Amino acid sequence: MHSSNRKSTTETQRHGEKLDLSFPAFLRASVSPWWLLPLLLVVASFAPAQEQITFRDITAQAGIHFTHNNGAFGKKWLPETMGPGCAFIDYDNDGFPDILLVNGQDWPGHPPHLAKSGATTLKLYHNNHDGTFTDVTRKSGLDISLFGLGVTVGDYDNDGFDDIFITAVGQSHLFHNNGNGTFTDATKSAGLWGPNEFSTGAAWVDYDRDGKLDLVVANYVQWSEQTDLYCTLDGSHKSYCTPESYKGTSARLWHNLGNGKFEDATEKAGLYDPTSKGLGVAILDYNNDGWPDILIANDTQPNKLYLNKKNGTFE
């Protein structure tokens, strides 16, 4: 559900370029609608017959062995309804995309007889260049247990190696790529430690165009184990509550200060809105002014499109 592209914006988005989707000159010679259909039919007749494309599951064959743990054990807690994110990342810059899979974890107080065999963690699979992958999670330092939900990949310190931000229930985490096949948890040193939220989607974006990637994080609702509500469909058994039962939470915007440090710029930038119940983030330049705008996809609330005012603020 909460997947992320390699960068928060494509190169086309970042530089304000547009793909030329116009008709060739000979098709634009006439604007009369009745000419258009026969001309399109002529062009279509010269197009090669489309081959049928089929897919087959090669997960096990490729060496990917992963089972998501949503932590469910009967209490019907809201985060258990969420699926995990994933990302392609060429973490070692060998030209072959590797795979990162986000995982959940068992809740505190989980009955021992239902507990999974060992703690569940993130999973990083290295591309072997032959269609197979090797689990390098422990070797890379990413064998971290957290209730992860989403992931976004970007080089926040401009050292040429992509870093990883994992959204989570509780404390989200930033992992710095050391450039030698390993990662270091930089959450505290980067100034991102503290917020314990229900974070879902995220994206890297250089919103002030200073050459350093900033971070926008979508948050879902105000939920915790202590504030969990009782909902029921039949009056006698607990069911999962819908998000309408909980108050919303504002997205967060982290401004990159350089030197590996971030500051919370949510309110200063005009993005603070506690009515949001965000699940996803999209970065786009919707008015083609060369400045990235932000779209927050909300659940049971209106989606929010924020226009970049080119001065560090949005509306």
Image (cartoon, rainbow, N blue to C red):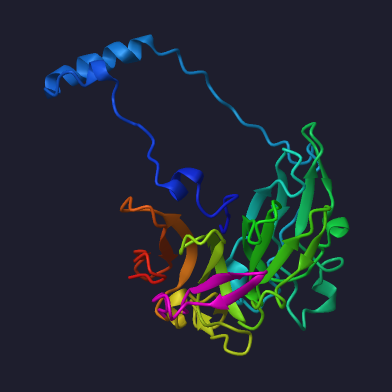
Residue 176 horizontal/vertical position (percent): 73, 63
Q: In the drawing, does residue 264 fall left or right of residue 30? A: right
Rendering quarter of residue 3: bottom right
Farthest-out residue, bottom? 226
Rendering quarter of residue 59: top right
Q: Residue at position x 62%, y 82% from top?
A: 196
Rendering quarter of residue 60: top right
Residue 175 versus residue 27 in the image, above or below: below
Residue 28 horizontal/vertical position (percent): 21, 21
Q: Residue at position x 52%, y 82% from top?
A: 222
Residue 308 versus residue 273 in the image, above or below: above
Residue 65 horizontal/vertical position (percent): 79, 49
251 within the magenta span: yes
- Pick the front one: 130 or 96: 96
Q: In the drawing, does residue 7 fall left or right of residue 124? A: left
Residue 155 horizontal/vertical position (percent): 64, 56
Q: In the drawing, does residue 301 fall left or right of residue 264? A: left
The stretch in magenta equals 249-273
Report if residue 87 is visible in the image.
Answer: yes
